[in-house]
Image (spheres, rainbow, N blue to C red):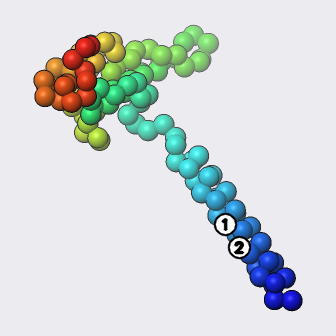
């Protein structure tokens, strides 16, 4: 009799944890909406490069990409912005990074 109670109780606990896990899954999905930074492009050392698209409407009323601006971030701080291409943003972030960190992150070959 005691074994049956323990088994039923453990099944109840598993169901409860499964339900909490499903709730967490939904929260994670909802939390991954795109932020104000834009699209993540790549990482150069400890800098992140994001692309921010400016949308405009065409004649049919649909949104299309008007222009793209590339921004260099370190954590949540904007380091530089206003680059027109990804290559310009990557080269500028390599220059900002410096020789010491380029050797640490093995970026001397680029």
Q: Which mark is residue 13?
A: 2
Q: Specify the quadrant of the image occupied by residue 21.
A: bottom right
Q: Quadrant of the N terminus?
A: bottom right
In percent of the image, x 40 and y 24: which residue is there?
41
> Is residue 102 visible in the rendered structure shown here?
yes
In percent of the image, x 63 and y 52: which residue is there?
26
Q: Quadrant of the C terminus?
A: top left
In percent of the image, x 80 and y 77: which residue is there?
7
Q: Position of residue 109 (x, y in %)?
A: 25, 14
Left or right for 12, reference 62: right
Q: Specify the quadrant of the image occupied by residue 93.
A: top left
Q: Nearer the viewer, residue 27 or 21?
A: 21
Rendered position, 17 above or below 62: below
Q: Position of residue 36 (x, y in %)?
A: 40, 36
Q: Position of residue 2 (x, y in %)?
A: 81, 89
Mark 2 residue crowding within 10 angstroms, few (<14) / some (14–19) / many (20+): few
Q: For the residue labelled by badge 1, is the local secondary structure a helix, a strand or a loop?
A: helix
Q: CA distance from mark 1 to mark 2?
A: 6 Å
Q: Nearer the viewer, residue 52 or 27?
A: 27
Rendered position, 36 above or below 59: below
> Is residue 81 visible in the rendered structure shown here?
no
Q: Nearer the viewer, residue 106 or 85?
A: 106
Q: Are marks 1 and 2 in contact (CB under 8 Å)?
A: yes
Q: Position of residue 57 (x, y in %)?
A: 52, 17
Mark 1 residue crowding within 10 angstroms, few (<14) / some (14–19) / many (20+): few
Left or right for 28, reference 7: left
Q: Residue furthest bottom?
A: 1
Q: For the residue labelled by badge 2, is the local secondary structure a helix, a strand or a loop?
A: helix
In percent of the image, x 34 and y 15: which residue is there?
86
Judging by the rendered image, the residue that carries numbered circle 1 is 17
């Amino acid at each position: 009799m005691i074994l049956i109670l323990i088994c039923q109780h453990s099944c109840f606990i598993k169901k409860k944890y499964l339900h909490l896990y499903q709730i967490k899954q939904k929260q994670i999905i909802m939390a991954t909406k795109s932020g104000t930074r834009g699209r993540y492009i790549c990482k150069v050392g400890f800098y992140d490069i994001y692309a921010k698209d400016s949308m405009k409407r065409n004649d049919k009323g649909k949104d299309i990409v008007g222009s793209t601006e590339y921004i260099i971030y370190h954590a949540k701080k904007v380091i530089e912005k206003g680059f027109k291409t990804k290559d310009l943003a990557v080269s500028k972030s390599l220059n900002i990074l410096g020789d010491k960190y380029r050797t640490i992150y093995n970026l001397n070959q680029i």
